[in-house]
């Protein structure tokens, strides 16, 4: 990274802990805005408040859809999207969990049709698809990468929800990057806890990073913050 600002613009700072309080979320959003992180990710019931707080700032708001397990019916995912769309342009990014159950069942046509339907609904927002690479074989990572590379309107493939029990690895990101050949950007999430983690994922193809450690990462770079 050339500068602290460049670093911050690659981080979606995340706070999705189940027992988090409103006061903690407000402090988190305020500090994230000060750092000029790319977006904040907060519990769904706090999204509207985060949108209000980040108005006229450089920090957007990412929302999670079908989170964290992904096997919601497509209609439910689309209804969630519509709910957040009604909050206006302050909801900048949609991180949608893939139906991993359908993928593991070999229902590749269903998986692709769902992704295309989601992309159609999100044509004017940033659409990130969470594919849970820690739970996929190399064959499955390559196949979903090829499908995603051909979907117009999909902006990022995101490695993990961070809730699947295993961290993202460098090899998983490398395989995904090799397969998509630059057609889609990659958001690495699930295991980005330090500057060293971020740097090793950049080397293998990561573009944007989801982490609950954004503030501690930038403090490594600039300890006075």
Image (spheres, rainbow, N blue to C red):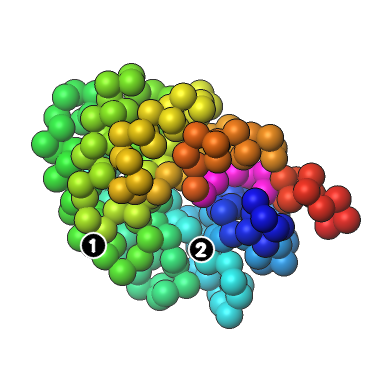
- Comparing 150 with 42, the one in front is 150
Q: Measured from the top left, where is residue 98 in percent x and y?
A: 30, 39
Q: Is residue 206 magenta?
A: no
Residue located beneath label 1 in the image: 121
Q: Residue at x 63, y 59 (%)?
A: 6
Q: Residue at x 79, y 45 (%)?
A: 220
- Which range of residues does the magenta coloring cover? 208-214
In this view, the residue farthest toward the left is 109
Residue 61 is labelled as 2
In this view, the residue farthest toward the bottom is 56
Q: Residue at x 53, y 66 (%)?
A: 60
Q: Measured from the top left, where is residue 26 in percent x and y?
A: 67, 63
Q: Of callouts 2 and 1, which one flags the residue occurring earlier in the amino acid sequence?
A: 2
Quadrant in the picture for residue 132: top left
Vertical arrangement, residue 91 with respect to residue 223, above or below: below
What is the distance, in whole Å, between disc 2 and disc 1 at their CAs? 18 Å
The local secondary structure at tag 2 comes to strand
Q: Measured from the top left, where is residue 7 in percent x and y?
A: 64, 54
Q: Residues within 10 Å of mark 2 (few under 14, many from 20)?
A: many
Vertical arrangement, residue 204 with respect to residue 219, above or below: above
Q: Residue at x 78, y 48 (%)?
A: 221
Q: Is residue 210 magenta?
A: yes
């Amino acid at each position: 990274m050339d500068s602290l600002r460049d670093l911050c613009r690659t981080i979606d700072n995340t706070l999705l802990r189940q027992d988090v309080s409103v006061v903690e979320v407000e402090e988190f959003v305020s500090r994230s805005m000060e750092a000029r992180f790319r977006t904040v990710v907060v519990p769904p019931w706090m999204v509207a408040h985060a949108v209000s707080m980040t108005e006229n700032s450089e920090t957007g708001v990412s929302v999670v859809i079908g989170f964290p397990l992904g096997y919601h019916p497509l209609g439910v995912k689309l209804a969630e999207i519509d709910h957040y769309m009604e909050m206006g342009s302050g909801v900048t990014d949609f991180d949608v969990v893939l139906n991993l159950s359908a993928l593991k069942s070999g229902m590749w046509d269903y998986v692709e049709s769902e992704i295309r339907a989601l992309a159609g609904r999100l044509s004017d927002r940033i659409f990130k698809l969470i594919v849970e690479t820690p739970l996929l074989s190399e064959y499955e990572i390559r196949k979903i990468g090829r499908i995603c590379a051909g979907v117009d309107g999909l902006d990022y493939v995101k490695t993990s929800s961070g809730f699947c029990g295993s961290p993202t690895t460098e090899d998983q990101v490398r395989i995904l990057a090799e397969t998509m050949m630059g057609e889609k950007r990659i958001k690495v999430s699930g295991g980005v806890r330090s500057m060293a983690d971020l740097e090793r994922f950049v080397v293998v193809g990561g573009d944007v990073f989801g982490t609950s450690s954004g503030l501690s990462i930038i403090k490594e770079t600039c300890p006075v913050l």
